[in-house]
Image (cartoon, rainbow, N blue to C red):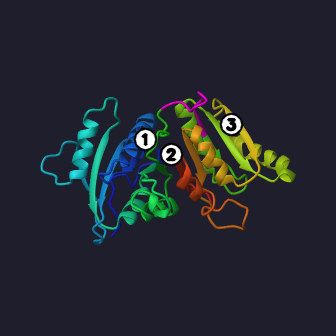
Amino acid sequence: MAVKSPDTAKPPRQRPVVVAVDGAPHSLPALDWAAKTARRRGAELLVVHVRPDYAPLGSLRTLPAGAPGHRDAVLAEVQSVLREREGLPPVRYASSAGVVAHTLVALGEHAQVLVLGSRRRGGLASLLLGSTSLACVAEAACPVVVVPPGLRTGTGPARDGRERVVLGLHPELTPQAAIDFAFLEARGRGTALEVVSAATSRRAAAAEEAQGHRLHAFSGGDYRDVEVEPVVVAGAPGARLATGSSTADLVVVGRPRRRLRTGSWPFSSVANSVVMRARCPVAVVPRGDGEAR
C-alpha cells in the first residue's frame, strides 16, 4: 500500500521539506538544516519518524504539534527541541511503522526536499539507517540532502570567510533539475555558486565551453543575480568535490539516469563518493519533470 500524503497534488515548490529523525544525536544537524531550508523557501517542515518494524507499509499518522496522547517518543523529543526555537516555519509531524527506506522514498514523491542525517562511521553503514540513505539517494523522486554530524552544516561562513554552494557539473549528464537546485540554494543563501567540472588537460577548453553553454540559461535568466565561479579541474571529480566540501556550505550533484563508461560521472563513483566523504551537506538531485529518466 502506498504512503498516503496530503501533499500529493501540490506543485513541487509548494510541497514540504521532509526530514527523517530517529532519536539519535546525528539526526539533529539534519533537523536544523531542514528547518532553515524550509523557512528560507517559505515551505512547511514535515518531521517524520519511521519505526523499522518491517511490517507492511501503511499510511502515515499525522500528529499536530503538541498532540496529546501520541506515543512516538522520538517525535515527542523533537517537539521538545523545536519548542525552544524561534522563527520556525510551519511544522507538521508524522509517525509510521514499516520498511524505512520504502516509506521515505514514497514520501519523496510529495516533497520538495528529503533530508537525512549521517553517522559517519565509515563504509556503507556510515549513513543514517545504514542502507536506507543509499536507497533514498538512489531512488527518491525529489532531491535528497545528506547532512553530516560535523561542523560544516551550512550555519556559517567557510574558513576562507566566503560562503558558497558547489555544483558538480558534467556538461552532458547533469540534470537540469540539479543545476536549478544549486542556483536556487545559492540565491536563497545570498552566496556565490562554484561550478566544478572535470576534464583532461587536452579537453579542458572544450569542457569550459560546454560548461558555459549549460549554465547560460540559468545565469542569464532567473538567476542572473547569482555570482557564478566556473572551475574545470583534472583528476577524479568525486575526490575534488569531497575535498572542496570542507569550505563549502552545500555540495550539489546530479543523479544520472544510467551508469556510463569508466571516467564519466555515474552515481556510483561521484555522488556516492561525495555523500560518503563530504564535510558539508550534500544534495543528490534526480532528473526533474520533463527530463528523460
* Mark 3 surroundings: few (<14), some (14-19) or many (≥20) residues within 10 A: some
Residue for point 21% across, 47% down: 76
Given this view, does label 3 or label 1 mark the residue nearer the observer? Answer: 1
Which residue occupies the extreme top position in the image?
161
* Mark 2 surroundings: few (<14), some (14-19) or many (≥20) residues within 10 A: many
Q: Is residue 96 left or right of residue 236?
A: left
Pointer 1: what residue?
A: 33
Q: Is residue 70 left or right of residue 276?
A: left
* Amino acid type of the residue that numbered disc 2 sits on in the rendered structure: Pro
- In depth, the one of 182 and 243 nearer the eye is 243
Which secondary structure, mark 1?
A: helix
For the residues labelled 2 and 1, say whether their Cβ atoms are less than 8 Å apart. Answer: yes
Residue for point 77% across, 50% down: 234
Give the residues in magenta: 156-165
Residue at mark 2 to residue at mark 1: CA–CA distance: 9 Å
Pointer 2: what residue?
A: 281
* Amino acid type of the residue that numbered disc 1 sits on in the rendered structure: Trp
Which residue occupies the extreme left position in the image?
69
Residue at mark 2 to residue at mark 3: CA–CA distance: 23 Å
Q: Is residue 4 left or right of residue 136?
A: left
Q: Earlier in the sequence, mark 2 or mark 1?
A: 1
Pointer 3: what residue?
A: 219
Q: Earlier in the sequence, mark 3 or mark 1?
A: 1
Residue for point 39% across, 60% down: 129
Query: Which quadrant is the C terminus positioned in?
Result: bottom right
Q: Is residue 67 above or below residue 160?
A: below
* Amino acid type of the residue that numbered disc 3 sits on in the rendered structure: Ser
> Percent from the top left, x then y, of residue 102?
39, 66
